Amino acid sequence: MKLKILHLYPNEMNLYGDHGNILTLIKRCEWRGIKTEVIEHEPGDLIPDDIDIIFGGGGQDSNQNKIENDLRKIAPKLKELVENDTPTLVICGLYQLFGDFFETSESEIIQGIHILDITTKAGSNRLIGNVVINTPEFGEVVGYENHSGLTRLGKNSVAFGTIVKGYGNNGEDMTEGAKYRNCIGTYLHGPVLPKNPRIADFLIKKALEKQGKNTKLEHLNDAIETRAHKVAASRPQ
Amino acid sequence: MEKVSILLGKTVQKISRVRGNGGSALPGLVIERTNPNFIKKVLEKLPYGVVVISGTNGKTTTTKMVTELFESQGLKVFTNETGSNFVRGVISAILKKIKISGKFNYDIAVLELDEAHAVKFSEVAPIDYALILNVQRDQLDRFGEIDHTAAYLQKVATATRKTVVLNREDPRVSKITAKNTVFFGLSDALVKKFPSDDDLLSHNKTKASSKKALVTLEKLGDKASYSIDGNNYTTNLKVKGVYNAYNAAGALAVVKTVLPDRNTDELIQSLANIESAFGRGEVFTINGCEVELLLVKNPSAFQLSLASFVDDKHEYMIAINDAIADGRDVSWLWNVDFHSLPIIKMCSGTRATDMALRLKYDDIKTAACIEDLKQAVTKFTSSSKQPKRIFATYTAMLEIRKIISGKSLV
């Protein structure tokens, strides 16, 4: 068994320890005897056909500008993969760009790639702090947010979770992130996967299912993960 | 007006000290409100002016080095204490030292200011020289993003009246512009030992910049070799860690800029005897066993600390807190590569489990995980006679220091 993980723009979109998400996928596969190959996609690269998991993180504004053109070029391929139920996790900056558009503070519209039905507007404050959400699929999820963009969900997307602590998409409607097919978009750093291993295992399981391997995922000892999750949930915002 | 302010400030200082407030920010606040020009008027009179030291990592020890280098040349140096590196803190520090008559008996001020506070300082006080060390990922929850931090430092540089001394090898620092700029740098061979923030994440190895530097750190082994103005100087250093040897190059560059005619050999001799600042590589003896306390604030500092301070002679503890001063967000731990570590005897602090979890994903075992620092330190230091090292975030370091001295174990 082998899974190919596509890591979008590891050099440009790598804020807030997002490398930890890739590491979590690799190790949780390795501990179960599943091989992994990480394909680091940089502007100009081609995307192979046989991608099993897609991951993309957040970046600072100046780096975001560097990848926008390339992202639009690979958008049809990414869209096809997501429509085919490829498990996908996009965080912060790439979550916003997977949506319809981002409106800057100067009312300039930056087009997204229309995979998630969300729109984002620049806000005047940064929404920063610990976050706890409730999700229908994974139960309680913990993380840390740091964004100024305010995201609204369109008709065709559902929230990834409901806010228990923190701001989430916009600080108003209690939603956090968006989910469409097997694609999760979220503002949660932390990084999100180590302390929420259920999400990591969901991505791995869906990837294996797509390969036609319906094996049950081997149980791992997640005592440290569970403890770290509980501590994170108990910290002040 | 000045005399009234001094009297007022000193009185407030006394009262707040009597009331047990430590007398830190309140007197500064009172003066800030009643006489906003106070700080400017006092500092403008200094014959050699004001030196500001800023950047993400190494400010405290570098400020100590610059201060002691000036003192070795006979200058009377006014400097702010750690923890008072904001405008009000500087005012309070001035109030402690200034005479009621208004006499402020110093030649030069050397001030450690973090990036955001340095900007605020530049709006109310003169800066003659600035030394900018680096821009690295630190407490992003406070400053937003790393490019904002660089923009703050550009503002400080623009406000600097004479010369700004810049780290040539940090891409965000070396492109800062100012009236006059001077660089300190590394030889090609050493560049890869000092990852800039981008290098740390992309694992690209860069070459030294081709800009001309006043001081470069050429070689680093048991001794450090510097090239200054084209001449070579080799010396022992009491400060530990590769980053301190490099920050010393910045310290030498700023001192040579302010005092260009002083004898470089003398400066190097003085540098050799300077020790690290409080909590930066301090060594305590507890129950007959050596315990070294190492501050880690952000991924690059942690990575460099691991490169300098991991061997098979020591036992290791890591203490991670998430108070505001440490950074609430602990994601940064995932940007550090821990593979060089042996088994970790103890993880502690409010985010002890986050640390243990991070280590697990680098296949490093954690023997024990106790959030309470007192219990953890006691257990760790009484387990064996082997020398020990503790990596700790800022508030964890302060707490551990208190625990060690409170128990009279020092």
Image (cartoon, coloured by chain):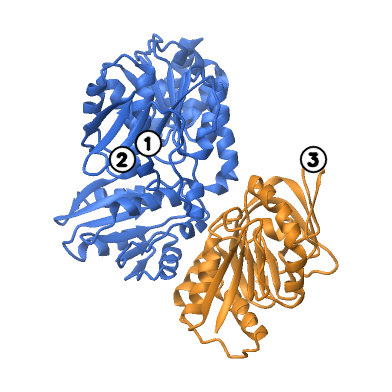
Q: Chain of mark 1?
A: B
Label 3, on which residue? A106
Question: Residue B149, image x and y in percent?
Answer: 56, 39
Looking at the image, which is closer to me, A30 or A168? A30
* Residue positioned 41% across, 37% down in the render: B83
Which mark is drawn over residue B168? none
In the figure, B110 relative to B304: above or below?
above
Give the CA separation, mark 2 to mark 3: 46 Å
Check if mark 2's residue and mark 1's residue have beta carbons within 8 Å: yes
Residue under label 2, please give it. Answer: B278
Location of residue B14 in the rendering, given as x and y in whole percent from the top left corner? 39, 26
Where is residue B246 drawn, in percent x and y?
A: 35, 38
Q: Residue drawn 19% across and 49% down?
A: B410
Tint applied to chain B in the drawing: blue
Do tags 3 and 1 sit on the same chain? no
Q: Is residue B197 left or right of residue B109?
A: right
Task: Give the position of the N terminus of chain A as an image quadrant.
Answer: bottom right
Tag 2–tag 3 contact (CB < 8 Å) = no
